[in-house]
Amino acid sequence: MEDPRKTDDTVKQGEVYRDKVVPTMHFQCGDINALEMMVPEDMWSVPTYIACTCKSADLRDG
């Protein structure tokens, strides 16, 4: 996959994100969400969906 960060062409960056990055994220999302429900919170090393959405809401409100 091309690295969209390695070009200054913003149109090309957008195309790579649209065509490569976003579909890859959606593909992995189901597995990650399932794992998040199985792994204890104190052992989960990445931000949870809830933590991200609550933090995002806090930023919008404040």
Image (tube, rainbow, N blue to C red):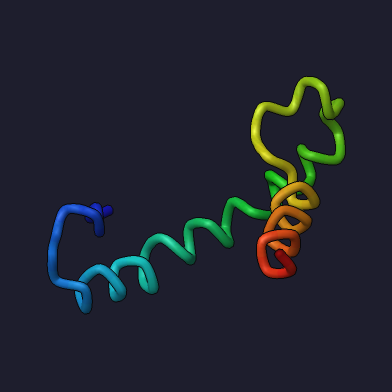
Q: Quadrant of the C terminus?
A: bottom right
Say whether residue 16 is left or right of residue 27: left
Q: Residue at 77% across / 21% down in the picture?
A: 43
Say whether residue 46 is left or right of residue 5: right
Q: Residue at 74% across / 28% down in the picture?
A: 44
In the image, residue 18 sits, relative to residue 22, either above or below, namely below
Q: Residue at 86% across / 40% down in the picture?
A: 37
Q: Residue at 86% across / 33% down in the picture?
A: 38
Most foreground residue, 5 or 58: 58
Occupied quadrant, residue 7: bottom left
Say whether residue 13 is left or right of residue 6: right
Occupied quadrant, residue 18: bottom left
**Residue 40: image location, x then y, percent:** 86, 26
**Residue 32: image location, x then y, percent:** 68, 44
In the image, residue 4 sits, relative to residue 18, either above or below, namely above
Residue ranking furthest to the bottom: 11
**Residue 5: image location, x then y, percent:** 24, 54
Residue ranking furthest to the left: 8
Occupied quadrant, residue 39: top right
Say whether residue 35 is left or right of residue 4: right
Residue ranking furthest to the top: 43
Badge count: 0
In the image, residue 6 sits, relative to residue 19, either above or below, namely above
